[in-house]
């Protein structure tokens, strides 16, 4: 890259284009054709699997073998799950879980 | 505009997550010497949190465009799977379709998967407003971090857990909606196996591929499970 002013612009453009291509891929493949039954099925069962993987992905830095053994993450996550099961209020679950986590990481 | 009220109500949790992560990105950019314009343009056009944050050190070290492209591919490859459930809905949205596709982040995807539209609401209009509001929150957060980052110095460590909490809430909601619980089990088993084999930094793509293939193979038992619960 010869011009240093253009370099960041080029980086942002490349990052955006690759991200867009990834997001557009399923739509480009199926175009306007009717969807095979398998795609309908996957569209229904993939989301719960992907969400579960995303939770694990978010918690990947947690170490369960050294202090504090993931205790803040476990307690805060359980609080979120229990609150969401009983009260079904998304804001309450997220805000309470996050505050609980922020307090716990300062205690441990 | 009842759709607008509905979209605001459903995106509030994402407002806070995006605001904080956006501010973090804005501060990172301004510390690296990049101005408000570049930061806001990144937020508007890329709209992918973890990749934007990885991009900053690569940019300051002058990484080649090829390596930036490869890194983007690996960090965002999970998005390859997101569109599959939305092909029909987005097709029916006309000119909004490209916008819906390009703004399909982890959070917007999760929300669109689990949102329960109230009766009488225009679903497509609501979905568009959800995607649009999420996008604007992100641009606003990044912009704020870029121009006011140095004045915001409260101790926000751990606020990132709001992203985890958000995905947990979505999983709980999906658990209630899904008749077959096998997809959740598949995800846990695939993650555990891939974590052991590939390690925490690179397990996500193999995990998603493994889930994809396992769910295809398990089509028969999963569909049987969905039917048997109908009784």
Image: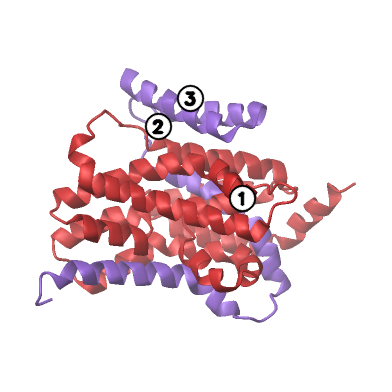
Chain colours: A purple, B red
Labelled disc at residue B69: none
Residue B214 or residue B21, whichever sits in front = B21
Q: Label 2 to label 1, Cα distance in Å?
A: 48 Å
Point out residue B58 in the picture as x, y percentages from the top left corner: 20, 60
Q: Name the residue under label 2.
A: A64
Chain bearing tag 1 is: B
Residue A64 seen in the current view? yes
Q: Is residue A105 left or right of residue B193?
A: left
Q: Nearer the viewer, mark 3 or mark 2?
A: 3
Q: Which of marks 2 and 1 is in front?
A: 1
Vertical order, B166 against A11 (above or below):
above
Residue B213 or residue B120, whichever sits in front = B120
Point out residue B12 in the picture as x, y percentages from the top left corner: 50, 40
Measuring 17% from the left and 56% from the top, which residue is drawn there?
B35
Point out residue B70 in the picture as x, y percentages from the top left corner: 31, 69
Q: Mark 1 points at which residue?
A: B1
Q: Are marks 1 and 3 on the same chain?
A: no
State the count of labels.
Answer: 3
Measuring 21% from the left and 47% from the top, which residue is drawn there?
B147
Mark positioned earlier in the residue sequence (3 or 2): 2
Label 2: element kind = loop
Q: Label 1 to label 3, Cα distance in Å?
A: 40 Å
Chain bearing tag 2 is: A
Residue A68 seen in the current view? no
Q: Nearer the viewer, mark 1 or mark 3?
A: 1
Chain bearing tag 3 is: A
Image quadrant in which you'd find residue B144: top left
Label 3: element kind = helix
Q: Name the residue under label 3.
A: A75
For label 1, the crowd category at 10 Å Cα-Cα, with few meaning under 14, some 14 to 19 and many 20 or more, is few
Q: Label 3 to label 2, Cα distance in Å?
A: 13 Å
Point out residue B31 in the picture as x, y percentages from the top left corner: 15, 48
């Amino acid at each position: 890259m010869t011009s240093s002013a253009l370099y960041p612009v080029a980086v942002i453009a490349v990052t955006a284009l690759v991200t867009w291509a990834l997001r557009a891929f399923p739509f480009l493949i199926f175009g306007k054709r009717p969807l095979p039954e398998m795609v309908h099925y996957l569209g229904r069962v993939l989301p719960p699997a992907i969400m579960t993987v995303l939770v694990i992905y978010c918690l990947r830095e947690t170490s369960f073998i050294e202090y504090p053994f993931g205790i803040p993450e476990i307690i805060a996550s359980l609080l979120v799950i229990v609150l969401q099961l009983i009260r079904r209020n998304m804001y309450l679950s997220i805000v309470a879980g996050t505050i609980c986590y922020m307090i716990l990481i300062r205690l441990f | 505009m009842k759709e607008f009220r509905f979209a605001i109500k459903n995106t509030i949790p994402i407002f806070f997550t995006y605001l904080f992560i956006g501010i973090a990105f804005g501060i990172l950019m301004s510390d690296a010497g990049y101005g408000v314009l570049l930061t806001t343009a990144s937020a508007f056009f890329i709209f992918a949190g973890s990749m934007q944050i990885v991009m900053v050190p690569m940019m300051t070290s002058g990484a080649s465009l090829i390596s930036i492209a490869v890194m983007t591919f690996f960090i965002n490859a999970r998005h390859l799977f997101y569109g599959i459930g939305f092909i029909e809905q987005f097709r029916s949205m006309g000119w909004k379709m490209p916008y819906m596709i390009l703004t399909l982040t982890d959070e917007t995807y999760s929300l669109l998967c689990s949102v329960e539209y109230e009766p009488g609401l225009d679903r497509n209009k609501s979905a568009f407003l959800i995607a649009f509001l999420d996008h604007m929150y992100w641009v606003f957060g990044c912009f704020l971090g870029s121009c006011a980052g140095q004045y915001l110095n409260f101790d926000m460590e751990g606020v990132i857990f709001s992203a985890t909490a958000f995905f947990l809430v979505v999983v709980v909601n999906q658990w209630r909606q899904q008749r077959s619980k096998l997809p959740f089990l598949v995800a846990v088993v695939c993650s555990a196996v891939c974590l052991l084999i590939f390690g925490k930094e690179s397990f996500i793509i193999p995990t998603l591929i493994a889930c994809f293939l396992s769910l295809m193979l398990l089509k028969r038992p999963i569909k049987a499970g969905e039917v048997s619960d109908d009784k």
